[in-house]
Image (spheres, rainbow, N blue to C red):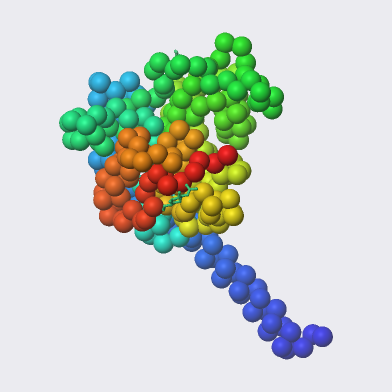
Amino acid sequence: MGSISATIGLLFMLYATFLSFESNKSQATSFPISSLISKDLYDAIFLHKDDNACPAKGFYPYDAFIDATKYFPRFGRIGSLVTRKREIAAFLAQISHETTGGWATAPDGPYAWGLCFKEEVSPQTDYCDSTNTQWPCQPGKSYKGRGPIQLSWNYNYGPAGKALGFDGLRNPEIVANNSLIAFKTALWFWMTEQPPKPSCHNVMIGRYVPTKADLEANRTAGFGLVTNIINGGLECGIANDGRVNDRIGYFQRYAKLFNVPTGPNLDCANQKAFA
Ligand SMILES: *[C@@H]1O[C@H](CO)[C@@H](O)[C@H](O)[C@H]1NC(C)=O
Ligand SMILES: *[C@@H]1O[C@H](CO)[C@@H](O)[C@H](O)[C@H]1NC(C)=O
């Protein structure tokens, strides 16, 4: 009691707490996203987003992307430099496929046309799952694809709005009207685990732990698993699917621009979709 060694022990604990506080702090603040993706790199990635041919012209500026990332402090900030850049490249690749204006013989190639669209042009439905009573569809509202990730369905608009502070069910249009909210919905989808699916974020930073069902379904970590999370029900388990290949093409181009390897398991041809 009150001995020197107890005092030293206490001081040591305080010092260790201080050190770990300092290192957490530096981990969280010394790598802003803008240090990994400059405006020049962003504009080189999205070469044609502000073309007259693109309906989203002017809707996806660099600053809106950077500002949106500030609401998700773990995005692009976990793991090694390669891991962090690869996560950002994968995110930008997936939103590029979702909003692509590219085609096989497009100027600068098919993968220079991400962020060309802000909303689905001719939706076949209102994307209303009326069996979902937690997030009920509102009369006359369409939950079609909007924003970088093409957020769709009432059961995504509802929780996205709740998490981000807008009325996703009564005002889904805001996702195609407000650039910051648009990027925030894409990052929300990326960061948020929707069981039984892991989050795209955890897959790309190596924190995905497959369940027995995942192992039986060949759902191994990699860019292909992210595709499975986003749209596996329609695209995975199919050999050489054009949509999956488009996502991969974007990722390969962006990984090169970030100067990082893509990692294995790029496609999901051998994976079963999530139930
Ligand atoms: C919001 O977006 C919709 C399309 O989703 C558009 O019809 C409407 O004019 C926009 N409203 C404003 C205020 O920009
Ligand atoms: C898992 O992948 C292998 C090939 O790598 C394939 O033969 C098998 O059918 C796949 N299993 C499922 C459930 O898709």
Q: Residue at the spot x=33%, y=40% of the render?
A: 240
Q: Give the answer, above or below, for where 137 lies relative to 275.
A: above
Q: Is residue 131 left or right of residue 261?
A: right
Q: Measured from the top left, where is residue 5 in percent x and y? A: 71, 88
Q: Is residue 20 left or right of residue 52?
A: right
Seen as rendered, the residue at the extreme top is 140
Figure quadrant of residue 169? top right
Q: Measured from the top left, where is residue 9 in percent x and y? A: 69, 82
Q: Give the answer, above or below, for where 145 lies relative to 78.
A: above
* Near-viewer residue (266 or 102): 266
Quadrant in which the C terminus appears: top right
* Near-viewer residue (136 or 132): 132
Q: Give the answer, above or below, for where 249 lies relative to 180.
A: below
Figure quadrant of residue 166? top right
Quadrant in which the N terminus appears: bottom right
Q: Measured from the top left, where is residue 39 in percent x and y? A: 30, 42
Seen as rendered, the residue at the extreme bottom is 4
Q: Residue at the spot x=79%, y=85% of the render?
A: 2
In this orientation, does residue 84 appear? yes
Q: Residue at the spot x=46%, y=25% of the render?
A: 145
Q: Residue at the spot x=45%, y=33% of the render?
A: 234
In this orientation, does residue 192 appear? no
Figure quadrant of residue 128? top right
Ligand 1's image quarter is top left
